[in-house]
Image (cartoon, rainbow, N blue to C red):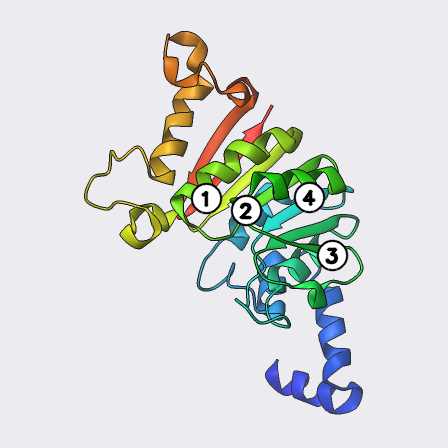
Amino acid sequence: MEIAKKFLKKIVGEKRIHKIEEYVCSGNLDKLAQIYNSDKFGRHMYTPIYANVFKDIRRKKLNILEIGVGGYDSSTEGGASLKMWKKFFPKSNIYAIDIYDKSKLQETRIKIFQGSQYDNIFLEKVTQSIGALDIIIDDGSHINQHVISTFNFLFSKLKNGGIYVIEDTETAYRDDMGGNSKNLDDKKTSMNYFKSLVDAVNHKEFDNSLFKNKMFVNKISSIHFYHNLIFIYKK
């Protein structure tokens, strides 16, 4: 396989081979992650889960927002998963936010806004610009307080039937990110917050003041927990 690939590179060139790989693997999320060098495969084995969840909607015209572009403060680095999503969802618009200016990474069907996920005024402007969202993926700061705050604000911006995803939830056990590995009942961690929403799915069966002021509770149909990954489905 590698010998054939090297031979093809000599004939048609590196860029051409890359385009061929993109086309042939457009429906294979694992391969696309490798082509674009996204850590959603390999370091994190998220793409097999994503592929299973998104397989029946990938050809729909969707608005997808990913929080976090990658590449830290470099204006030309990052955006691997945005390109991956663009290829996997051929009819969708891919949006992203990042605290650094990543405008140089924009291309057709990829638009990036600069700002903080912890700034609700900024998030409101972004969602007003985009409109209703079908999928939201939080791959941002991973700070527990940010993750919870962002969800509380953005879940209402998700269309009915939409999917909200939180990645890298291992930070719920890291002290430097606002997590806690010693007290697994710490209510301030993102993991415990989302575990509490499992009760919210069944909140009609009991009286609990925790959910009385949360308007989105009636909109949660199910919550799925995976290794370092959470999916929340909106009714």
Left or right, 88 with reference to 202: right
Q: CA distance from mark 2 to mark 1?
A: 7 Å
Residue 146 image label: 1
Q: Circle 2 sits on which residue? A: 117
* Mark 3 Cα shell of 10 Å, populated few (<14), some (14-19), many (≥20): many
Tags 2 and 1 touching, CB below 8 Å: yes
Return the disc, 2 or 1, that comes first in the chain's sequence: 2
Is 179 placed above or below 216 here? below
Q: Position of residue 201 (x, y in %)?
A: 46, 20
Q: Quadrant of the C terminus?
A: top right
Q: Residue at x 38, y 32 (%)?
A: 193
- The answer to whether residue 12 is left or right of residue 152 is right
Q: Are marks 4 and 1 in contact (CB under 8 Å)?
A: no
What amino acid type should be assigned to the residue bearing mark 4? Val
Q: Amino acid at mark 2?
A: Gln
The residue that disc 3 covers is 110
Secondary structure beneath dot 2 equals loop
Q: Considering the image in quadrants, where does the N terminus appear?
A: bottom right
Q: Residue at x 29, y 48 (%)?
A: 173
Q: Position of residue 225 (x, y in %)?
A: 42, 38
Q: Which mark is residue 126?
A: 4
**Residue at image location 72% in from the left, 58% down from the top:** 87
| Residue 221 falls left or right of residue 113 | left
Q: Amino acid at mark 3?
A: Ile
